[in-house]
Image (cartoon, rainbow, N blue to C red):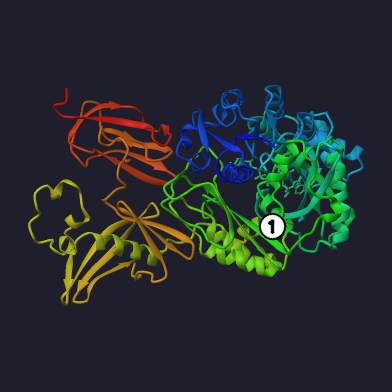
Amino acid sequence: MFRSVLIANRGEIACRIARTAKQLGLRTIAVYSAADADALHVRVCDEAHPIGPAEPQESYLSIDRLIEVAKTTAADCVHPGYGFLSENADFAERCEQAGIAFIGPPAEAIRAMGLKDRAKALMERAGVPVVPGYHGDRQDATFLKRKAYEIGYPVLIKPAAGGGGRGLRRVDKHADFEAALEAAIREGEAAFGVSRVLIEKFVVAPRHIEFQVFADRHSGIIHLGERDCSLQRRHQKVIEEAPAPGMTSQLRAQIGAAAVKAASAVGYVGAGTVEFLADWSSGLRADAFWFIEMNTRLQVEHPVTEAVTGLDLVEWQFRIAAGERLPLQQSQLHIDGSAIEARLYAEDPENGFLPSTGTIVALELPDNIRVECGVEAGDRTTPYYDAMIAKIIAHEPTREAALERLAQALDRTVVVGPRNNVAFLAGLCRTSEFRQGRVDTGFIDRMLAAGGGGPSRADRAAAALGIAHLLARNPIDQVAGDDSPRSEGESEMPSPWATRDGFQLGGMRSLAVPIVIDGENGMATISYGISGMRVTVDGTAPATDARVFEVAEEAYVVRHGRQTRVRLKDFSAPASEAGVADGVLKAPMHGRVLEILAGSGDRVARGQRLAVIEAMKMEHTLRAPFDGLVSRISVDTGAQVVEGAEIMVIEHVGDA
Ligand code: ADP
Ligand code: ADP
Ligand code: MG
């Protein structure tokens, strides 16, 4: 066995690999980009080394830099995880050349499967059924269009190199073909550097069923059963399970044998996944499974296979790379119970599932259930990497029990800060279609199209609760005493209490206070009577079934898994804590500069608004941290800025 491993990845998968590596007694070596210096994967490994700036191209995708660190740390092997360089044949080769074992298949096997068109041709020759279509070399548009017509609409245009559902284009009409082709080529080129495409018959309403395979260096090769990953959004997996609903052991043996044949055809070694589409209109049948692609790496959803087989797939990867034989024979495989995994993302289901960045203010993950997580409260989600926060995996004797367990675990999960899909996932678990195991790859998109997806109305009850909490922290007499003279200095900061529209009715004093709910302007009404203060938002009283997390001047109210962010309007989000003391104003998050409100050389007063930054549709005001002079303006209006970027610098007046 190896003595040390360099983990060429980040996030939950880096933490996951480190856990098994430690159990096997390996020294764990983490690498990190500038955005990840304090990341969890850095903290859980024995040592950690910087590899470059936040941009993946210059860090987690930098082969030179990774090889250099692997050499200087004398790593015995490199585990690439998934994503990043995990399916990069050049990286595998460079590791081997440097005498460092690559935890993955040989470079030739990665190359053979890396391009979908070549892989399909290879599979056809090996006698594995593939999705019908055209996957040859000829690429002129007229020819491809004719092929599409012959295949019959709808068709799917796929970039030959690809992953994560990117660049896939469904075409329903002959007239739409050229435009879709152009788009697929453009996306394939931009994302993967390959302009070739293939055309497939679009299988309407299929299930995505994939097989986990494992091969050793001694000609041993087996499958570990299937995973059903039909719950997808725009061709990306959302919830995965094992076994597939409706799978029989006879069918598993048949399709498993095809998967093994596929892997054997390329001289496979290590962990791999052979993906199929299944037409299940008349039940799952061996003659209605078609190969789509092989992923030559560990898969995001590998934990469901681990759960039902009782195996540690990462351990197997290490053992096989170290030259050991497969620990099991095909006949010894047992599938026990049912496992379901949900992927928790920092994204906004009400806003096109846009990734959401920012500090994770609070994170409560369920216990008594398997959770794979790459972050802790206080960490940030950044725009640089995949927005996945964690995976939650339920394993129970039956599918019904596993699904119920997962739904309950999601109900107990609280992510505060970035927008997230927790409530969306819990909702999915409760749809009758999913409960009955009757979903295909188009289910989520159809559900969203039918009206689940748009922005919901602001949750006024949640907002009222948040405002009540914020006010409870501000002494009430400060509010009520609008007739009393202000103390010195208090008027510096514009304050809602300066509003003079308070009115009195039968001993009840009411005040209209401007607030901001999820970035939109609103109004709260605050009334004071003998029973104390009462807050309403558009007549709605505070929720009683929600939790409030206060951060600086803002409250995050989590109600039924949905987050409402609220603040009093004139207390803008504070300038980023970092750097304020030295007068450097920084962007609190990735975004666009909407306004610069001061000029170089201007004198500014503490609390004065100096810049407005729009990020994820929210506006953040940067204010002067002290009385001073603007000594530098570092960006122009309209500029895109990364989190932490310098916006302007304020000097103390009288500074040398
Ligand atoms: P799989 O094919 O394993 O089910 P995907 O199709 O979602 O999973 O592909 C893996 C994707 O994971 C990559 O395309 C990338 O966007 C993302 N990814 C890469 N590294 C990480 C990571 N460390 N944490 C979370 N996601 C990652
Ligand atoms: P990627 O490399 O992006 O994972 P895949 O070829 O695996 O690309 O396809 C991703 C998903 O797109 C599949 O899981 C399936 O939902 C859908 N898909 C792929 N090919 C077809 C097809 N021919 N017909 C219908 N859906 C398809
Ligand atoms: Mg795929």
Asked whether 296 or 224 is in front, the reply is 224
Residue located at (68% from left, 68% from top): 435
Quarter of the view holding residue 97? top right
Q: Is residue 471 above or below residue 9?
A: below
Residue under label 1: 307
Asked whether 256 or 239 is in front, the reply is 256
- Percent across and percent down for residue 93 are 72, 25
Residue located at (19% from left, 40% from top): 606
Query: Quarter holding the N terminus?
Result: top right
Residue type (three-letter) at the residue carrying disc 1 = Ala
- Percent across and percent down for residue 363 are 46, 55
Secondary structure, mark 1, is: helix
Residue located at (48% from left, 52% from top): 419
Residue located at (9% from left, 61% from top): 483
Is residue 131 in view? Answer: no
Quarter of the view holding residue 379? top left
- Percent across and percent down for residue 465 are 34, 65
Q: Is residue 208 above or below residue 60?
A: below
Q: Is residue 432 above or below residue 325?
A: below
Asked whether 42 or 526 is in front, the reply is 42
- Percent across and percent down for residue 638 are 40, 33
* Left or right of 51 on screen, residue 628: left
